[in-house]
Image (cartoon, helix red, strand yellow):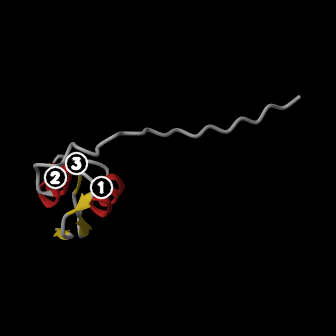
């Protein structure tokens, strides 16, 4: 009997509030400067940079703001 096993490794991080006070471009540049894996840096950049966001408070939404 031959066993074939396949593994999937994943990590889940809740970073929803981690970057509230930092500029995303600074975080991405710092990751690159300390030799993070290029794919991780690119994925982080795609997640944090060049987005729009708004804030919801008591059922009301603020205007959308560009995040660069």
Quadrant position of residue 5: top right
Q: Is residue 32 left or right of residue 3?
A: left
Question: Dots 2 and 1: beta carbons under 8 Å?
Answer: yes
Q: CA distance from mark 2 to mark 3?
A: 13 Å
- Residue at image location 31% in from the left, 56% down from the top: 38
Count residues near mark 1 (Cα–Cα under 10 Å), then give few for <14, some for 14-19, many for 20+.
some
Give the number of marks: 3
For discs 3 and 1, the disc positioned in front in the rendered view: 1
Mark with earlier residue (2, 3): 2
Q: CA distance from mark 2 to mark 1?
A: 9 Å
Q: Position of residue 31 (x, y in %)?
A: 20, 50
Q: Which residue is mark 2?
A: 27
For discs 2 and 3, the disc positioned in front in the rendered view: 2
Q: Which residue is mark 3?
A: 35
Q: Position of residue 16 (x, y in %)?
A: 28, 46
Mark on residue 44? Answer: 1
Relative depth, front residue between 56 and 1: 56
Quadrant assignment for the C terminus:
bottom left
Q: CA distance from mark 3 to mark 1?
A: 14 Å
Count residues near mark 3 (Cα–Cα under 10 Å), then give few for <14, some for 14-19, many for 20+.
few
- Name the element at disc 3: loop
Q: Residue furthest right?
A: 1
Mark with earlier residue (3, 1): 3
Question: Dots 3 and 1: beta carbons under 8 Å?
Answer: no
- Residue at image location 16% in from the left, 49% down from the top: 20
Relative depth, front residue between 51 and 35: 51
Q: Position of residue 8 (x, y in %)?
A: 58, 40
């Amino acid at each position: 009997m031959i066993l074939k096993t396949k593994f999937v490794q994943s990590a889940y991080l809740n970073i929803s509030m981690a970057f509230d006070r930092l500029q995303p471009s600074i975080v991405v540049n710092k990751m690159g400067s300390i030799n993070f894996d290029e794919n991780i840096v690119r994925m982080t950049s795609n997640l944090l940079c060049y987005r729009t966001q708004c804030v919801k408070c008591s059922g009301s939404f603020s205007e959308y703001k560009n995040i660069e």
